[in-house]
Amino acid sequence: MAGLRVAGLRVAGLRVAGLRVVAVGKPDVGSGLVEVMPRNAVLAVLPLWLAACPSSDVGRPCNHGPAFVPQGQAITFPALACDDLLCVYAEDVDEPAGTCSSDADCNGPEAPSKFHCEEGSCALDQAYVLQRSMCSQSCESDADCDGGDPDTTCHTGFACARIQSLGDHCCEKLCVCRDDLDLAAARQLEVECRADTAQGCCDRDPHPTACGS
């Protein structure tokens, strides 16, 4: 009988996250185990167990593929490590100008590994980008971004924001870590996308559905 297994026990008629439960007192065929927990006790604990489980993988680490060369904000689709196939690096950064002879010339104490020195110029470091790349999903409000990966490296939570005015995901609302989000830029883009005036996106043919909404 299909159901849910909790600590080797079964209770009839329930299936959650691949776990199995059958009627109290009946043997678990093939395992040699017999139930010792009352069905009511299992059902009472089950909602608490489910509430503790993450409802999405927002914030889980992800990567952009072997050919990815980091140059700034990036949205990769499909990213197979993510439930919604979206991997986002949200920080919009400019490489330090001037020449360099070592990585130290490119970085400040607040982010000592963000850039590396490459042939005399500072470039965004791929390892840093991967550390700040996280699974995302489409959203309508900040609440849609709650309940993600409990082990995420995002410290300030997630916002539902538009971060790109160009590309396949322009004007789309996605869950973005506030650590990396430029709030002023996101607010300005929100105004432009809602007004259907974001250049390079809302003037495309076919017209993106994210514009004007």
Image: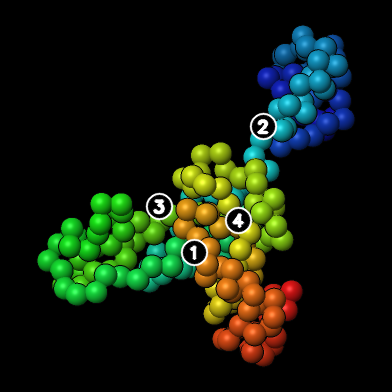
Q: Amino acid at mark 4?
A: Ala
- Picture coordinates of residue 103, whole percent (x, y): 19, 60
Q: Residues within 10 Å of mark 1 (few under 14, many from 20)?
A: some
Q: Amino acid at mark 2?
A: Ala
**Mark with earlier residue (2, 3):** 2
Relative to 153, say whether 180 is above or below.
below
Q: Amino acid at mark 1?
A: Asp
**Mark with earlier residue (2, 1):** 2
User: Between marks 4 and 2, how big is the CA–CA gap?
Assistant: 21 Å
Relative to 60, say whether 19 is above or below.
above
Name the quadrant containing residue 121: bottom left
Determine which of the numbered discs, if any, sits on residue 182 in the image.
Answer: 1
User: Between marks 3 and 4, how big is the CA–CA gap?
Assistant: 19 Å
- Residue at screen point 58% across, 52% down: 158
Q: Disc 2 designates what residue?
A: 52
Say which element carries label 2.
loop
Snapshot colouring: rainbow
- Residue at screen point 74% across, 74% down: 213
Q: Disc 4 designates what residue?
A: 159
66 or 175: nearer the eye? Answer: 175
Say which element carries label 3.
helix
Q: Quadrant of the N terminus?
A: top right
**Mark with earlier residue (4, 1):** 4
User: Between marks 4 and 1, how big is the CA–CA gap?
Assistant: 11 Å
158 or 12: nearer the eye? Answer: 158
User: Between marks 3 and 1, how big is the CA–CA gap?
Assistant: 18 Å
Determine which of the numbered discs, if any, sits on residue 131 in the image.
Answer: 3
**Mark with earlier residue (3, 1):** 3
105 or 209: nearer the eye? Answer: 105
75 or 178: nearer the eye? Answer: 178
